[in-house]
Amino acid sequence: MSFDDEESLEHTLLVVREVCVYKIPPRTTSGGYKCGEWLQSDKIWTGRLRVVSCKDRCEIRLEDPNSGELFAACFVQPGQRENSVETVLDSSRYFVLKIEDGTGKHAFIGLGFNERNEAFDFNVALSDHEKYVRRELEKESGEMSESDGHIDIHPAVNHRLKEGETIRINVKPKPTSGTGMLSAAGLSGAVSVSAKAKTVGLAPPPSGMGKIRAPLPPPPNDPAAARINSASHNNGVRAPKETTRHSTTDPSSDLSQIEVCY
């Protein structure tokens, strides 16, 4: 929707039930206004504030809360917000408005909000109107550039087949070896039958590990050795002739000369 279609439409962006208007002294320096210089006795009006969007212009209206009578109005033209609304240097709740009577005369008044969130909403409403005007201007300029500057120099090409024409597609044969996607990627999922198995030689064990040590002889008077000796006699193992010759006085001599067979 363009601005011409909204000529008779007004959009209320913000309503604040109570604000204060001050008579401010002339600016003494180029730095800006300070609300600390405004006296309480300089308050000249209390009423309602409305921020209204009228096409590309934003209006700040100060109205009587009961009758709706207009006390003063500030007109914010596109791209000229700083000329109509100015923040003070020492507070975020106070502003300076440039009001006009419609005949070319203007004056500067002080505007004060009771709460900080009301002053924040006031700034947001003005910023939203600026964004809206910017979007509408970009939309109109985009539509004009598309209608005026776009020229199609490429004629439409008909890619449909004529009667009797055919399309020939060459399909590569599937590989006979490999395992599908793995073989195409250079990876084999299984070992080929024709592949020769590689033999892996094992290193010989160390020289000391190949020798088997003989068991140590049992100690004398060992009950386990006596049981092994009796078991070997039962199996038909005979001791050498030297073992049969022993002294009857030494009971342990026969055990020390027994050859144990495993």
Image (cartoon, grey):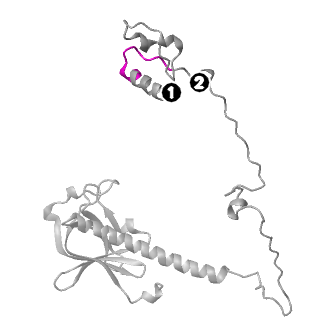
Relative depth, front residue between 222 and 76: 222
Q: Main secondary structure of the magenta part?
A: loop
Q: Quadrant of residue 38?
A: bottom left
Question: Residue 73 in the image: x percent, y percent?
Answer: 29, 77
Q: Quadrant of residue 76?
A: bottom left
Is 242 on the left or on the right of 172, as rendered?
left
Please name the residue shown 34% across and 83% down the image.
Answer: 11
Q: Could you tell me if residue 110 is visible in this image?
A: no
Is 181 on the left or on the right of 70, as rendered?
right
Question: Residue 81 in the image: x percent, y percent?
Answer: 39, 68
Please name the residue shown 21% across and 84% down the image.
Answer: 69
Instruction: Give yes or no for residue 79 being in the magenta stretch.
Output: no
Return the residue at label 1: 236
Return the residue at label 2: 209
Give the residues drawn in magenta, as a range: 215-225
Please name the residue shown 41% across and 10% down the image.
Answer: 253
Instruction: Give yes or no for residue 220 being in the magenta stretch.
Output: yes
Question: Residue 139 in the image: x percent, y percent?
Answer: 52, 79
Question: Residue 16 in the image: x percent, y percent?
Answer: 23, 75
